Amino acid sequence: MLWYTGKRLLQMIPVFFGATFLIYFMVFSLPGDPIAALFGDRQPAPGVIEQLRIQYHLDQPFIVQYLIYIGGFFHGDLGTTYSGRAVSDVMAAAFPITARLALLALFFESVAGILVGLVAGLRKGKLFDASALVVSLLLISVPTFVIGFILQYVFAVKLGWARTTVSSEAPLSELVLPAIVLASVSFAYIVRLTRASVSENLGADFVRTATAKGLSRRRVVTVHVLRNSLVPVVTFLGVDLGSLMVGAIVTEGIFNINGVGGTVYKAIKLGEGPTVVSFIAVMVVIFVLANLLVDLLYAALDPRIRYAK
Amino acid sequence: MSQTVIEPVTTAVRDENSPLLEIRDLEVGFQTQHGVVPAVRGVNLTLYPGQTLAIVGESGSGKTTTAQAIINLLANTGKVTAGQILFEGRDLTTLKAKEMQDVRGRLIGYVPQDPMSNLNPVWNIGFQVEEAIRANGVAQGKAAKLRTIEVLKEAGLSDAEDRLKQYPHQFSGGMRQRVLIGIGLSARPKLLIADEPTSALDVTVQRQILDHLATLTRDYGTSVLFITHDLGLAAERAEQLVVMYKGKVVESGPSQEILANPQHPYTQRLVAAAPSLASRRIQSAKHPVVAAPATSVAGANDDVLIKRAREREDAAPTKDLISVEGISKMYRIRTKGLKYNDLLAVNDVSFGIQKGTTTALVGESGSGKSTVAKLILQLETITSGRIEFDGQDVAGLKGADLLKFRRRVQPVFQDPYGSLDPQYNVGNTIAEPLLAHKVGTAKERQERVRELLDQVSLPWASRHRYPSELSGGQRQRIAIARALALKPDVLVLDEAVSALDVLVQGQVLNLLTELQTELDLTYLFITHDLAVVRLVADNVCVMQQGRIVEAATTDEVFDNPRQTYTQELLAAIPGGNFEFGR
């Protein structure tokens, strides 16, 4: 197991270089001149543009720009934004907020999703199951921003239970509503996945044998059905972390949260290579680590999965 | 529902005992989209304390449904619609869920059919046994752990302490079945329901486990309700027999009596089709080959089969079509970390098959018989030795030559459910090899499909059906038709009839022999079932641990087995020496 974990961690190195290189290349290839865009309609002094180009190494060929960036990265220097802030400062401000939001969403979707899915699977064909299916279909088909605006209107504007916008510190209590919005789509998928998995396992031979042993219904369901049903759900949660970060862009927009989503969106529009690449690189690392965690969780859930080498 | 059922087990007078289990006019139905479909239609049976009773019937006869109805293990859609199940005078059909929970495990134990799927793969063995012990209030805490070890030891796992923390996938099929028997008996129930407890296991393992089960239940005075499709097993293991057909009991009484003198036409067919060694000898000696009456279809099969075997024996010997000389196959098995262990799956095996004859490879699972088949089919490469087909060395055949070889040597596999593509209809399935080898035009291929369906006795209309709509026997016919599509010389039949019910098995074997005569086919027949070998094979090779331990003509092997291993195999056939009535 240790051997396997080590190997997986080593695999992150090529993934890191590949991802940063590709993203840097894509930002470099974006049409438009970032420096010109910075000044908008105003006409700057002729020397200023040239000076800024040199300052941000934009006069260099692509590969040199990338190498300068990577070199700085390993010295702890992630470069500066075009407005002069250090990228590391921007990240330190944005990441904790989005991390709080995403983890809260992950918590909501897994707890509520597995619970609803389990009950629906146990009562297949009954009213609860039918309602769960309809609601989850609705959540999947309606875009997040629509759900976001509806919930914002109902709970924040009409009922006043939450704030319409989140303050700049973004404490956990204010993030509850945005997290629910962010979790909504994944919640729907988890409900459906758990439901299918539970109803399949209910028909398994070993569940019948467990019943024949004289176990209570509760024990049969929690011990013999639930654990076996979680493997596909855990897979989904690992992959879902990525889509939570993407989804955060929309949700953060609705609730005016200064998180990763908004920052990356602005940076892409400005063509700020170092900012975009630094953020994405951290996301890639988080994503790879999350998937490693999922693979290790697998082995814990299902003893038939053992990573020998 | 009116019916004439012989009141069961009245012959056994047991005035001093009241029945342990009494099923009266039981009806069970399954809810489907087209209304309730009855599965059990008025079953009566009586079981006294300490007795063993077997319910016999083919798949779909309602025997398992009857057994599951007793402790309400029916699927959600299944319901007892009428009748009573009296256990010690208490009607189990009226119990509430909580009360039934107390009956299960504690009063009535259950041993399921398939050891591979009946243990939860994510919990270790100790946990799953201990859970049953705790739930039935046998012992708690540390005592439960000690009891777990005791139960497993009783069930025949001598190294139980060391294996508690192991998971089901680390156990062999036989070991898992022992665990399941341990679980079933852990609370010393008064009744044990054993649903085909050994049908997934090798004969020798089966014998060990049944012997063990018999000892345990005798020691505890447990009554046993066997569910089986195997008449021989029923004859050997149960005092009382209930024969079920299409949800009804067609015959019941003491098992020896029923098997020696079956009354109902269905029981007669079942008895006639049971491949038993002893009965076959009597049959072939007494009766010259005549067309048997249509009522005993399977009995007629045997005569015809034997006649054909004779004809083949009379044919003049020619050069071997397939000749296998000293082949070996080594597999590297990865153990811990980077280490490898070499496993010699096939060890210096030699034999020859003449054109138009059948050679059977017999052995337990793990004996290497299927590996030999794969080597001959060129699905695996040999480590050493030489395989010749029609005078040509087949090792290292490539490209067009290999394709040509494949056209002439076709396989049929064991599982007719797994070997057909569920998305392909019958016509396309049969035509696929023709398409793959680019044979003929679309029209010619269709003609060939028609011809093949005819050869395997399936109607032309069935070409539009899908595997899920066919029975096991029909699927195996499709698999045979597909194998025949390219007009091969050799069929390699890997356990081709093992998954089928006795009656269907008889039909398929008959079909195979007919085709052999008609098309001059050569068969390599791989099976663990010696009783079947007797029906179809000219020569037998008995394999054990990768070697051929005995090779001779079928008659020699059966009448005069020289190796102890062969003798063991023959002795392990359930009811092998029981004389069935005809």
Image (cartoon, coloured by chain):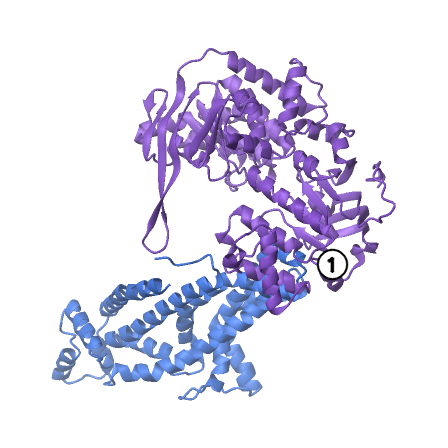
Pinpoint residue B257: horizontal percent, then vertical percent. Answer: 77, 31
The three-letter amino acid code for the residue at tag 1 is Val
Work out whether residue A41 can be spotted.
no
Residue shown at 86% from the left, 47% from the top = B16
**Is residue B510 shown left or right of residue A13?**
right
Front residue (pair B218, B475):
B218
Q: Which chain is purple?
A: B
Q: Is residue B563 above or below residue A34?
A: above
Seen from the viewer's position, the closer of residues A281 and B184 is B184
Quarter-of-image position of residue B559: top right
Tell me what residue is drawn at x 61 percent, y 54 percent. A203
Toward which corner of the image does residue B291 lie, by quadrant? top right
Determine the chain carrying the residue at label 1.
B
**Residue beneath disc 1:** B103
Quarter the N terminus of chain A occupies? bottom left
Which chain wears blue? A
Q: Residues within 10 Å of mark 1 (few under 14, many from 20)?
A: many
